[in-house]
Image (spheres, helix red, strand yellow):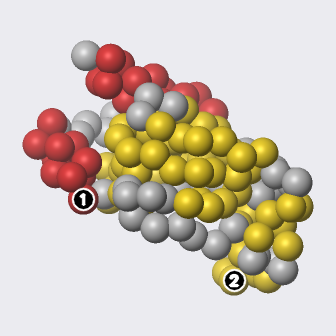
Amino acid sequence: MKFLGALAILLAMAVLMTGAGGGLGAIYVGHDKLMATLAKGGTLAKTPEYTVGTNVRTESAVPEIHEKTTHIWYVLDGSATYVTGGTLIGGKVTKPGLTQGTTIEGGKTVQLTKGDVIVIPPGTPHWWKVVPKSITLYAVNTQ
């Protein structure tokens, strides 16, 4: 029950943060689609203002900065070493609104585990530094 409550809260946060919901109407995701998406990762709902889905990571990734995207993640399972803030080193724009680099200096390192929530505002360097096995996230990303 805590899990479903957390999902509802995170989706509500995404809608409130973006001001969405005026003309689009409600988006319903049935439990069968939710469970299938949780197993492999994917999108549950997408509008011009936000994307809601799940993400299953099995390896580290390059550090990056999003110009406009806010990440709101709830860790469903697994763990990872995550770095936020500091200075992105070796940054290059890889597509509009996204800069990727080689490392982060001076960032805050946290160990993400089941039950944690992390919010990463636009312009904040962030990095999946170590993913020992896998980590599964419920993800709300504003555009």
Q: Quadrant of the C terminus?
A: bottom right
Q: Position of residue 29 (x, y in %)?
A: 23, 40
Q: Position of residue 119 (x, y in %)?
A: 64, 38
In the picture of the structure, the residue carrying the numbered disc 1 is: 40
> In the depicted view, which residue is nearer to us: 143 or 105?
105
> In the displayed image of the protein, which residue is found farthest to the front?
132
Q: Position of residue 28 (x, y in %)?
A: 25, 37
Q: Is residue 129 shown to the viewer in this render?
A: yes
- Above or below: residue 65 compared with residue 81: below
Q: What mark, if any, has residue 94 been given in the picture?
A: 2
- Above or below: residue 52 compared with residue 64: above
First-in-chain label (1 vs 2): 1
Residue at the spot 25% in from the left edge and 48% down from the top edge: 38
Name the side, left or right, on which 73 lies relative to 138. right
Which is more foreground, mark 1 or mark 2? Answer: 1
Amino acid of disc 1? Lys
Amino acid of disc 2? Thr
- Above or below: residue 80 compared with residue 77: below
